[in-house]
Image (spheres, grey):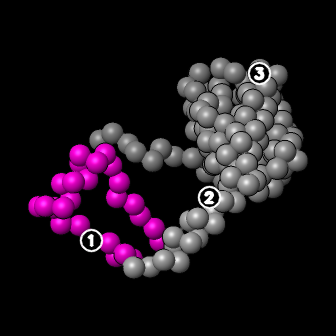
Amino acid sequence: MPISVLAGKKEFMRELDSDVFYSFTFAGETLSLAASVATINFMNKNMVIEHLWKVGNQLKDGTNNIIEKSGLGKYMKCAGLGPYSTVIFYDAGLDPLHVKSLFMQECFKRGVFFAGYHILCFAHTPKIIDKTLAVYEEAASILKEAIKKNDILARLEGKPLQPVFKRL
């Protein structure tokens, strides 16, 4: 539903009464306001924010535990906040995009779409996080073996990831 808000301190908002032009595309549209109120009520009633932090921390901490347990800490780590975290791949003597490519591939093959970051929603349950972590554990095990045998590229079933931005 489309919605926007123009808000601020009273002293600044007073300026809108004089020389400032502003317009809202959906100014008279009240369905979005009703949807917003319903969403806020649902979020409060179901403790959505608390849930996102709980499952997000479960995923972030679990990911870091797997990384440490697998001995991959110098190649990757999960950083950020519970509801939104990122798995960072380091340049530790191996191309980090190759390392990430193999990890992603092995996650995909096991039914987890992993793009390098976690954006949690209310539908993510502790059970889903446990399944995701089980897949991460399998992928980490394969990655560890590939690093040990120095055959990451040979294990890839496609081209490795490429940088999005390049210096000219």
Residue drawn 63% across and 66% down? 38
Q: Is residue 83 depicted above or below 149 in this figure?
A: below
Residue drawn 23% across and 67% down? 22
Label 1: which residue? 23
Q: Nearer the viewer, mark 3 or mark 2?
A: 2
User: Which mark is drawn over residue 59?
Assistant: none
**Residue 92 included in the magenta stretch of the image:** no
Q: What element carries label 3?
A: helix
Across and down, in percent, residue 168 comes to 29, 41
Which stretch is magenta?
Answer: 1-27
Q: Earlier in the sequence, mark 1 or mark 2?
A: 1
For mark 1, does the 10 Å Cα neighbourhood hold few (<14), some (14 to 19), or many (20 or more) residues?
few
User: Which mark is drawn over residue 68?
Assistant: 3
Identify the amino acid type marked 3.
Glu
The quadrant where residue 16 appears: bottom left
Q: Is residue 21 depicted above or below 56 in this figure?
A: below
Identify the amino acid type marked 1.
Ser
Q: How far apart are marks 1 and 3 (CA)?
A: 53 Å
For mark 3, does the 10 Å Cα neighbourhood hold few (<14), some (14 to 19), or many (20 or more) residues?
some
Label 2: which residue? 40
Query: In the image shown, does 74 or 161 lie closer to the viewer?
Result: 74
Query: In the image shown, does 75 or 45 lie closer to the viewer?
Result: 45
